[in-house]
Image (cartoon, rainbow, N blue to C red):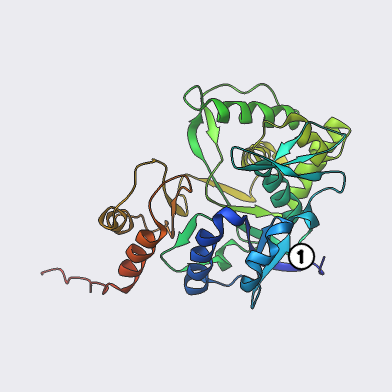
Amino acid sequence: MMTHVAGTVSLITPSYREDLERSALLFDSVDRHVRSFERHYVIVHDDDLGLFKSFHRGRRVVLPASDFLPRWLRQVPWVHWRNRQYWWSLKARPVSGWHTQQLVKIDAAARLPEDRFCLIDSDNVFFRDFDVAALANPNILPVHVYRNGAGEHRPRHLKWVQTSHRLLGLEEPSFPADDYIDQIIVWDKAIINAMTARIEALSHRGWAETLCRVRNFSEYMIYGTFITREPSLVGRYKVTTDSFCRTYWDDDALRERDIAAMLKSAAPHEVALCVQSFNPTPLSVISRALRAFETQPVEAPRLKSA
C-alpha cells in the first residue's frame, strides 16, 4: 500500500456486478457533488474487475477484493445461493459475499494510506454538495446512531449487538440498544486498528478469522460499539442522530414525484439518497428525479416586512 498521508479523507465503496448500474449512478453523483477527498476506492470481486475497469480513472481507483481478504479465504466459483457468492476456508464455516464485503471495508480502512474514510454503499446517490474536509483529522469524528434501534423488532440487529459486545469483551447488552448501521459512515484508521487489536487480544486469533467464525456480525455495529465504549477515545468523536443520507427502506416502487418529495423535504444534513437495492424502482426514474431536483432554480430568500 501507499505511504500514509496525514489529515486526509478518502471514499470507499465496495460493489459487485449486480450493482454495476447503481454504482455508475453513484460515481457520477460523486463527481458532481463531493469535494476535498483524496481518492474514491471502489473494491470489487476479482472476477468483476473487467466490468468496472472503465471507472478506473482520475481520483477513482478500482481495486480487487483479494487485496483486502486473507489468503486462506478462497472463493467458491461454482456456488451461488440466493444470488450470493461464497468463500471457504479450513479455519471457519463458509462465508458469503456480504460477509467478505465487511472484511474488505475493515482491512481497507486499516491499510489504505489516508487517515479517515467515508464508506459509501453503492446504492447511494448524492443530490447536494458534500465537502468531506469537515471529516478530516483533527476534526471531531461523527458517529451516527439510531437510538434504541436494535431490539426484538430487528432480530438480526439484536444478534449483531450481542456479537459486538462479545468480540470486544463488554458486558451483555440490554435492549433496546443503539444501532450504528447507516448508508454513509465515517471511519478513522487509528480507531479501526485499535478495534481489530482488541478483537485479536481477546480471541487469540486474527480478527478476520474471528469474524468468519462468528459469522453473525456487522462491521458498523462493532465499530460503533467500540468507539462509544472506549474511554481513551472520549473527546475524539461526537454521537449524532443526523444521517448524511435519506434512505427509503420499503419495497414498493417509487414514482418520480415520490422521489421529488423526498428530496425536497430532506434535512440540510442529508446530502445523499439511498433507495435500497431490493426496491424495484427503475434507476432511470431515480436518475430523472435527481436531475430535475438539481436543475430546479433556487428560491431567493424572502425579505421580512418591517
Q: Is residue 236 above or below residue 221?
A: below
**What residue lies at 72% left-to-right and 58% top-to-bottom?**
47
Pick the residue in front: 161 or 293.
Answer: 293
Residue type (three-letter) at the residue carrying disc 1: Pro
Instruction: Provide the secondary structure element on which disc 1 rests.
Output: loop
**What residue lies at 73% left-to-right and 46% top-to-bottom?**
103
x%, y% of residue 141?
Answer: 60, 54
Pick the residue in front: 278 or 194.
Answer: 278
**What residue lies at 38% left-to-right and 51% top-to-bottom?**
281
Instruction: Report the number of numbered marks.
Output: 1
Q: Quadrant of the C terminus?
A: bottom left
Pick the residue in front: 184 or 165.
Answer: 184
Q: Quadrant of the N terminus?
A: bottom right
Quadrant in the picture for residue 287: bottom left
Q: Which residue is mark 1?
A: 113
Quadrant in the picture for residue 304: bottom left
- The crowding category of the residue bearing disc 1, from other C-alpha atoms within 10 Å (few below 14, some 14 to 19, many at least 20), is some
Q: Is residue 183 left or right of residue 39?
A: left
Question: Farthest residue toward the left?
Answer: 306
Question: Farthest residue toward the bottom?
Answer: 58
Q: From where the camera sits, is residue 284 visible?
A: yes
Q: From where the camera sits, is residue 121 visible?
A: no
**What residue lies at 45% left-to-right and 69% top-to-bottom?**
129
Q: Is residue 113 above or below residue 233?
A: below
Pick the residue in front: 77 or 130.
Answer: 77
x%, y% of residue 142?
Answer: 56, 52
x%, y% of residue 231?
Answer: 70, 39
x%, y% of residue 42?
Answer: 65, 62
